[in-house]
Amino acid sequence: MNDIHEIADSEITPPAFYDNRRNFLRAGVVAGSVIATGSLYRWLNPVRLVGSAGTHVVPIQPSDESAEELLAKGWRVDETMTAETSILNYNNFYEFTTQKEAVAAAAANFKTDGWQLVVDGLVNKPRSFSIDDLHSISRPQERVYRMRCVEAWSMVIPWAGIPLAHLLEAVEPMPQAKFLAFETLFDPVRMPGQKARVLEWPYIEGLRLDEAMHPLALLATGLYSKMLPPQDGAPLRLVVPWKYGFKGIKSIVRISLVAEQPKTSWNRFAPDEYGFLANVNPTVDHPRWSQATEQRIGESGRRETLMFNGYEQQVAGLYSGLDLRHDF
Ligand SMILES: Nc1nc2c(c(=O)[nH]1)N[C@H]1C(S)=C(S)[C@@H](COP(=O)(O)O)O[C@H]1N2
Ligand SMILES: [Mo]
C-alpha cells in the first residue's frame, strides 16, 4: 500500500479519452464563449487518489491524513466500477420519462448553459452560484461510490464534485437552520415528463444539516471524468452514498436552509414506502419487496445489501440513539 499517491489526471486517463478531451478543449477554444478555458483546466484536474491494484481512496480535502490512514479507516471502495454505458443508459429521472432505458434519449437535448444554483433561507450569505463558482469554492474531487436504488439494483460510480460542506461553509448557515431542502428545475417544456403528474413537481429532497455536513455528501458536477450528462442530473446533483438513490436529487436549482424537516417528493407520494432518512438498510424491507439483496448492474446473481450501503463505519455516528428499525 505504499505506492498510494496523488497523481495528475492525465497520468491515469486512458489515451483515447484524453484525445477526446483535447478535441473538446480545442472546440471550447474555437467556440470561445461557452466555457472559459481557465475553468475547463481546473475541471480537467480533479483531485484523485488511487492505491495499488486500483483501490479507490475517498479523499477528504482538506485533510491531514495520508492516503494510507484514509484506507485503514475504510475510506475506500475496492470494487469494479460499473460500465460507463450502463451508468449512461439505465437511469431514473422521471422529469423526462419513467422508462429507465429511454432517459438518455429523452434528456439528450437538455441545455444547462447559464445554470444558477440559488442557496437561500436561514443563511447569513444567501447567493446564487454558477457551476464555475462552485468549482472555485472547491476544486472538484473524484469520488468512487456505491449507489443503491430503493428498487434493489446498484452500481459503482466515479463521480466528481465538491463536498456539500464546502458550499455550506460559504453561505454560513444560521443557528436555527436544521435541514436543507433541495429543488429540481421546474420547466415542463425542457423537462416534458413534468407534463404528467407522476410526482408533484418540482422534485424535492432533503437532508438534516449534520448529514449535509458529512464529508461523504457530494454535489456532483462530473461523471467518469466528464461533465455530468443530462440523464444523470446535469449540471449538478446530490450524491449521498449511504442513502437510497432517490435522495440523490438531480438538476438542482435551489437549496434552502430551513428549520423544519422539508416535505419531500417520494415521501408525499407514498409515505409508507419512502421515508425522509432513507438510509440503506438490509434489515428493513420495502413494504412490497425485500431490501436484503440487490442486483449489481453488470453482474449475474444477487449480492447482499450492506448496512448504510457499506458506509457504516463513516456515518453510523450520525444516527446513534435512533431506532433504525423503522427507517425505510
Ligand atoms: N430530479 C430527480 N432526481 C432523481 C430522480 C428523479 O426522478 N428526478 N430519481 C432518483 C432515483 S430513484 C435514483 S435511483 C437516482 C438515479 O440516478 P442515476 O440515473 O444517475 O443512476 O436519481 C434520483 N434522483
Ligand atoms: Mo431509485
Image: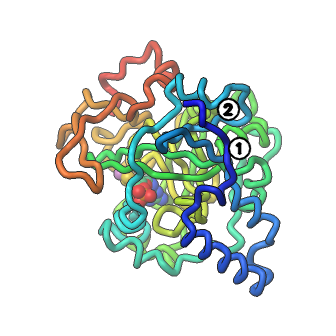
Cα distance between the residues tagged 1 and 2: 8 Å
- Side of 254 where 269 appears, left or right: left
Name which of mark 1 and mark 2 comes first in the sequence: 1
For the question of whether residue 185 can be seen, the reply is: no
Q: Is residue 143 visible?
A: yes
> For numbered disc 1, what is the local secondary structure?
strand
Instruction: Name the residue tied to disc 1.
Output: 121
Residue tagged 2: 177
Count every numbered label the image shows and give the total. 2
Residue found 60% across the figure and 36% down from its top = 3
Q: Choose top left, top right, bottom left or bottom right for residue 67.
A: top right
Q: Height in image: 154 above or below 276?
A: below
Residue in the foreground of this view, choosing between 326 and 317? 317
Q: Is residue 37 above or below residue 199?
A: below
User: Which residue in the rendered view is the most extreme toward the front?
Assistant: 3
**Outermost residue toward the bottom in this view:** 30
- Given residues 69 and 125, the one toward you in this image is 69
**Image point (65%, 34%), residue name:** 60
39 sits to left or right of 221: right
Task: Determine crowd level at label 2: few under 14, some 14-19, many 20+ residues with C-alpha closer than 10 A.
Answer: some
Q: Name the residue located 69 percent from the left edge and 58 percent from the top edge.
A: 117
Residue 22 image point, x, y percent: 67, 75
Amino acid beneath label 1: Gly
Asked if residue 320 is positioned above or below residue 121 in the image, the reply reads above
Asked which secondary structure carries label 2, the reply is loop
